[in-house]
Amino acid sequence: MKKIITNVMKNVIPSKTVEKSKERIAEKALELVKKEILKFPEIIGVEFGGSFAKGTWLSKDADIDIFVRFKKSTSEEKFEKISKKIGFDALKDFSPYVRYSEHPYVEAKIKETKINVVPCYDVKVGEWKSAADRSPFHTKYMSNALTQKKRNEVRILKTFLKSNGIYGAEIAKQGFSGYVSEVLILHFGSFENLIKSISKIEESQVIGKTSKIFETSLVIIDPIDSNRNLAAAISDENIGKFILVSRAFKENPKLEFFKKKKARVSKKYWENVLSIRFNFKIRSPDIIWGQIKRATSSLSTQLELSGFTVLRSKAYTDQKKEVCLLFFLESTKISEIYTKSGPEFFRERSCDSFIKKNLLNSAIVWVGNNKKIISLEKRRYVDASKFMTEFLKNNPQIGIPKGLQDDFKCGFKITIGEKGLSKSIKEVGNELISTDGTLLHFN
């Protein structure tokens, strides 16, 4: 394992040329922001944050975060309005646009490097007013705590996570963030120690110190806020992938763990995939992703309630206008009959009520060998496509988040299979009907 890690280390550390280029871009962006903050008495200062400030950035993927610190007394309205103005005016020559976390922030690209101008309040530890308030403390903490060797170990971990498709804090991914990567390396000391520990980690194990109880598959405590569980933002799917790929790498270390592995797709199951396509009115990527993920979950529930078994589901958006919700079903057509179990025959009142209610409307009612009264019911829908079409026309307020309902009213299209789908949607559909790439490492 040590030999592989040493080999990877050579490729993840940015060259001096790349480092100097990134520094020039960062300083240019900082100077532009500094000029703009002079116009506002609400601003206390400005500073670098994120992986650039902490020296854990990857040469091919290095965003530069600039944090604008506001006086604690600044109203939320001014906080948002002024920060957007500073970002847009400072980066006006680089086509700036708004992104959203808890609060809006401005992003632009200078020579393919993303610049994020993020507002935060100037507060003491524990007196957080916005989600970004912790970030300057994260930067200071990690800048002091991480040695140069550990910074490079973080880079190895980030490469490992990216290669296995589980890196990124954005809601679309729900993976491991850059800060979580730093926390893990700091806690375990090295990438090798981390891999060995994660390989045998137990459910709900706590990484860090806290007196609070958290109910997540894994608990990663924020070093500057013992009441915050960083793993709460990571999906169980991605936690599972990390554990499995760590076990596989521990057992058989290879360079291919640091390269993207292609999933094994079972194309024959495309006829079991139901997709719902519609266009949306442009909004922040974080907002639309949140809405379509909730819609996917809600509609999966509705399909299940109507007798269709949903094996997996995914959402896709191009973040410009198109959305597609995809559902991998056990079958798109189901039997027109099903059984409904009633109470046990010893429960007199419940039993009488069930019999009277179902005797006239059910096809058959009988006493089962499991001591329960059972009725045979007829389904209204046996075709998933027809069910979903009718449901979305008649009950959009039940299955669709409020923010998407106007988009659905403008029209939607339901299809079975891959015919008529764009290349990008097909790629997401292929993920539903494939053996996950992280599992292929066990071959």
Image (cartoon, rainbow, N blue to C red):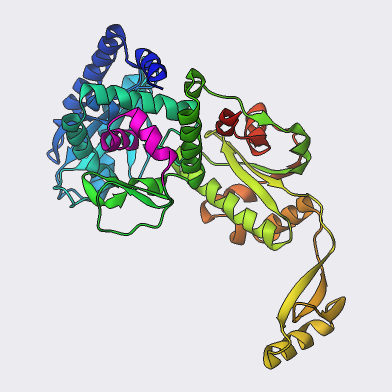
Q: Position of residue 147 (x, y in %)?
A: 20, 25
Q: Is residue 362 above or below residue 89?
A: below
Residue displayed at 64% across by 42% down: 278
The one nearer the camera, 188 or 423, is: 188
Q: Position of residue 100 (x, y in %)?
A: 38, 40
Q: Position of residue 341 (x, y in %)?
A: 74, 75
Q: Quadrant of residue 158?
A: top left
Tell me the quarter of the image containing the C terminus. Answer: top right
Residue displayed at 50% across by 20% down: 259
185 part of magenta stretch: yes
In the rendered image, the residue lying farthest to the right is 363
Q: Is residue 406 visible in the rendered structure shown here? A: yes
In the rendered image, the residue lying farthest to the top is 17
Q: Quadrant of residue 18?
A: top left
Q: Quadrant of residue 81?
A: top left
Residue displayed at 78% across by 88% down: 356
Q: Position of residue 342 (x, y in %)?
A: 72, 79
The secondary structure that most of the magenta stretch takes on is: helix
Residue displayed at 54% across by 41% down: 281
In magenta, the rendered stretch is: 180-201
Tell me the quarter of the image containing the N terminus. Answer: top left
Q: Would residue 64 be found to the left or right of residue 257 on screen?
A: left
Q: Would residue 333 be found to the left or right of residue 438 on screen?
A: right
413 part of magenta stretch: no
In the rendered image, the residue lying farthest to the bottom is 348
Q: Is residue 284 visible in the rendered structure shown here? A: no
Q: Would residue 195 be found to the left or right of residue 381 on screen?
A: left
Q: How many marks?
A: 0
